[in-house]
Image: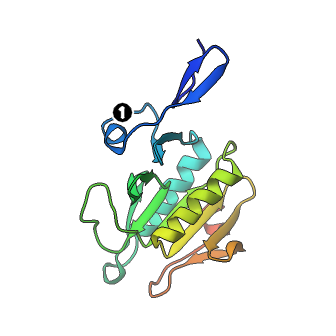
Amino acid sequence: MQACPGMICFGQVATRTQITTEQYLHMTFEHDAEFVHGEIVERSMPDYIHGRIRALLLSKFEASPPSHRLLGCAEVRMKIGPDVYRIPDVAAFSTPPRLTVPDLPPLVVIEILSKDDRQTDLMQKLEEYRTWGVPNIWIVDPATRRFSVYTELGLQNVSSFTLAGYPFQLTQPELFADL
């Protein structure tokens, strides 16, 4: 029988298995998995470049001055709806979340694209973040070395990431210099 993660396989036909939020929260995964409306959603496996970008982003957040503290975290499960749990590659909070599985939006979420990410899945996830109330949704594309932001207008390429009210700026050359 072939492997069909999140599905029950019968020969060559796979049937999606619906599970409850409680079941998802008590499951253990070899690789982080998200939960969307009763289904397990596998995340792309990061490679070396993905991991380095994540580390550089986190160090940039952690270097913020105490007066404008940014608390960076990597791959934290977040409850963005009653039956939707997403795991952004990087997030930054201005204050510590009150729960270990945050249910209030962070200041920033960042998705680092992987070769096997599907555009439709990415756009769904970005819109879920926007609807949830994340004010800064950033996308880093290592293959093209581009930055994008996601707003109600969709994806827009930018040359740097900035945060209103914070002395924070990250340029493309700064992030990609050592990769």
Residue 53, position in %: x, y? 56, 55
Quadrant for the N terminus, please: top right
Residue 74, position in %: x, y? 43, 54
Q: Which residue is mark 1?
A: 28
Query: Relative to the observer, which residue lies in front, 53 or 124?
Result: 124
Residue 126, position in %: x, y? 58, 62
Residue 68 appears left or right of 145: left
Picture residue at 62% right of the left edge, 76% below the top? 152
Mark yes or no: residue 178 visible.
no
Mark yes or no: residue 175 visible.
yes
**The furthest residue to the right:** 144
Query: Relative to the observer, which residue lies in front, 63 or 137?
Result: 137
Q: Is residue 50 above or below residue 17?
A: below
Mark 1: amino acid: Thr
Number of residue marks: 1
Picture residue at 48% right of the left edge, 48% below the top? 37
Picture residue at 40% right of the left edge, 70% below the top? 63
Q: How is the image coloured?
A: rainbow
Query: Relative to the observer, which residue lies in front, 167 or 20?
Result: 20
Q: Is residue 155 above or below residue 142?
A: below
Picture residue at 45% right of the left edge, 88% below the top? 165
**The furthest residue to the left:** 98
Residue 146, position in %: x, y? 71, 64
Crowd around label 1: few <14 · some 14–19 · many ≥20 (10 Å): few
Residue 153 appears left or right of 51: right
Q: Is residue 49 above or below residue 148?
A: above
Q: Is residue 151 above or below residue 20?
A: below
Write down the quadrant of residue 13 in the picture: top right
Q: Secondary structure at mark 1?
A: loop
